[in-house]
Image: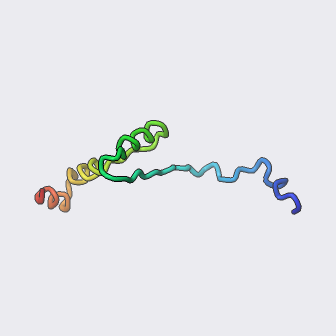
Amino acid sequence: MAEPSRYTIGCEPVPKDLTFRPTAAVIGLPASGKSCLAEIISNRTGMVHLRPEQIIESFVSRVSHFSERLRKKT
């Protein structure tokens, strides 16, 4: 046990069957360039750029009782 690295040579620190999905959140003041930065990060890393407006629009356009109530309020 004087040299623990001797027992870890060639061993993977993380199982190979796990997938690593990095996430990021871009926050800031209005009109500070958050969307632009998120788009750059998405293009460079392959992450999905989620826009709150698109999520809300897709939810409201679904066929459900709650979505119907939301459409009537707008």
At 82% from the left and 54% from the top, the residue drawn is 5
Residue for point 45% across, 41% down: 41
Residue nearest the viewer, comparing 3 with 63: 3
User: Looking at the image, which residue is at 42% across and 52% down?
Assistant: 25
| Farthest-out residue, top | 43
Return the x and y of residue 8 as percentages of the image width and height: 79, 53
**Residue lying farthest to the right in this orientation:** 2
Residue 12 is left or right of residue 61, and the answer is right
Total marks drawn? 0
- Residue at 39% across, 40% down: 39
Q: Position of residue 23 (x, y in %)?
A: 47, 51
Q: Nearer the viewer, residue 21 or 33?
A: 33
Does 27 sit above or below residue 47? Answer: below
- Relative placement, left or right, of 34 versus 47 is left
Relative vertical location of residue 36 with respect to residue 55 in this rendering, above or below:
above
Residue 57 in picture, x, y percent from top left: 23, 50
Rendering quarter of residue 42? top left
Q: Position of residue 14 (x, y in %)?
A: 65, 53
